[in-house]
Amino acid sequence: MAANIFFVGLMGAGKTTIGRIIAKHLNKTFYDTDHEVERRTGVSIPVIFELEKEDGFRKREAAVIEELSQMQDLVLATGGGAVLLPENRQHLKDNGTVIYLRANVHELWLRTRNDKNRPLLQNENPRKKLEQLFAQRDPLYRDVANIIVDTGGQPVSAIVHQIEQKLESL
């Protein structure tokens, strides 16, 4: 089984929730890139977006991914846009097993529609924004992934079980 496991997918796909459970089951250390960026800067992601725009946030996120992907025996939940930078995709591919948690836009919208900590969705039509993000990022998630798991309409326990079975068969 892979020493490192990296979760990718759009916001609301379940990367942090599933990642924490998988890390606990496999006795690995769990990290979330968004939480790590917030911990290191001392401010929330919406504040980083406000002050440094998306580019500033992506640079901070890339530094966290580069550093954490070099470590051993961890589970990492990446931010939804982490795959936008080629160097991030390369770090993930080179240093562990990448799992794409995939959900349809409607499911993602239902999960994220009331969350004010998602700067990209703070606009007049968050569902349309999710559709755009899905169209842009789905090919990148597919490209980097060793495993793709559809998370729509399943309980967390079923998703975790499916991932553990797929990891064992690698």
Image: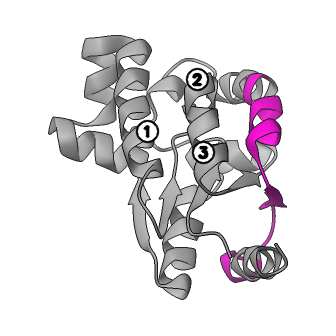
Q: Residues within 10 Å of mark 2 (few under 14, many from 20)?
A: few
**Could you say which disc has been placed on residue 165 in the image?**
none
Q: Residue at x 51, y 24 (%)?
A: 120
Q: CA distance from mark 3 to mark 2?
A: 11 Å
Residue on which the image places disc 2:
85
Q: CA distance from mark 1 to mark 3?
A: 9 Å
Residue 15: percent from left, percent from top: 58, 57
> Residue 151 in magenta?
yes
Q: Nearer the viewer, residue 104 or 20?
A: 20
Q: Quadrant of the N terminus?
A: bottom right
Three-letter code for the amino acid on which mark 1 is drawn: Glu
**Could you say which disc has been placed on residue 92 in the image?**
3
Three-letter code for the amino acid on which mark 2 is drawn: Leu
Residue on which the image places disc 1:
66
Q: Residue at x 80, y 77 (%)?
A: 162
Give the mark toward the camera: 2 or 1: 1
Q: Residue at x 52, y 19 (%)?
A: 123
Q: Are marks 3 and 2 in contact (CB under 8 Å)?
A: no
Q: Secondary structure at mark 1?
A: helix
> What are the residue bounds of the magenta stretch?
136-158
Q: Secondary structure at mark 3?
A: helix
Q: Residue 12: in sight, yes or no? A: no
Residue 98 picture quarter: bottom right
